[in-house]
Image (spheres, helix red, strand yellow):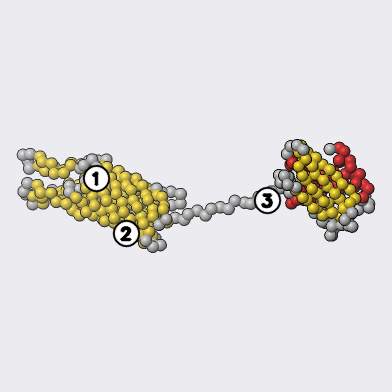
Amino acid sequence: MGRWLAIAVMYIASSATSALAAPAPHALRWVRAPGAESCIDRDALVAAVELRLGHALGDGGAAVRTIDGRVEPSGDGFRATLVVRDERSESIGERDLAATGDCRQLDEKLVLVLSLIVDASAAGEPPPTPPPRVTPPVATPERPWRAGLAVSGTYAIGALPGVALGGDLRVEVAPPRWPVLVASAGGWVPDRVPVAAGTSRFAAVGAGLVACPQVAFGATQVRACGGGELVRVEASGMGFALNRSVVEWVVFARVEAEVVRELTARFGVVAGVGIWIPLIRPRFVYSDGAEVREIYDTPAAAGVVRLGVRVAL
């Protein structure tokens, strides 16, 4: 490498018009022969030379000298030839560079020799690479709070002695990054159970709260809900010599699945099924003084089906 570096420096010394003169503009023509496609291309070579020089090859006006470069396979490696021509296209110098194995081993030699041909001061260290431009991260806007109101009809087995029909009003709130929270209040149509000479009337109202993680598929949301329900069950005697009323509070654990389908930007339908498990199981009985008869024993689980309409607030 010392030999071709010395030759390049001698060329600069002999061809410069003044030690302090600005470097003459140069133009580079670069050809990769067949089989040398893996070698550095012209754009990359020019960029590397200009980075070392700190200025463009053509700075100062139109090019007055031309460097014809060619790289081709040679034996077990590659050979590069550089021919320098003046403004009359006459050759004023020629340099040969060689490398074995990978053609990219010529890159550093080519950049240094070309830089010295253009400007002898390029023998020093190349200018530092400018720091990369840092683009500040763009904050993703947080999903806003959303709310909705739903009115549903319910069908339950196990909430009252017979099949219970009812309805509820629900308020939904969807905070950012949290499951949908649903608060509900509703009741069932009273159910009657014949007992001896009279009738027992069962009525129930309740309120609940569930949290519903959801997955959206376009205009459809699928929810898996879990929470609780507090139900007030009142059993009243009717037609007896002495009518009495008993009130029991039943706490249910709720596990439900829901599907919400948006029909428009504001209106949609909701359908769901669930299992309610009572944590307290009251037992209702009738006594005529001689014997005690069971009227209703709260079952271990109740099934609930819901269908309703929903409006986004």
Amino acid identity at mark 2: Val
Q: Give the class, few, some or many, for how many residues have Cα within 10 Å of label 3's Cα (few <14, many ≥20).
A: few
Residue depicted at x 13% and y 49%: 193
SS at mark 2 in the image: strand
Task: Quadrant for residue 76, please give it.
Answer: top right
Residue at which label 2 appears: 309
Q: Give the class, few, some or many, for how many residues have Cα within 10 Å of label 1's Cα (few <14, many ≥20).
A: some
- Marks 2 and 3, the one that precedes in the sequence: 3
Q: Position of residue 192 (x, y in %)?
A: 14, 51
> On the rendered structure, is 231 left or right of 81?
left
User: Front-most of 158 and 23?
Assistant: 23
Q: Which mark is residue 133?
A: 3
SS at mark 3 in the image: loop
Disc 2 from disc 3: Cα separation: 53 Å
Amino acid identity at mark 1: Ala
> On the rendered structure, is 7 left or right of 138?
right
Report the mark closest to the observer, 3 or 1.
Answer: 3
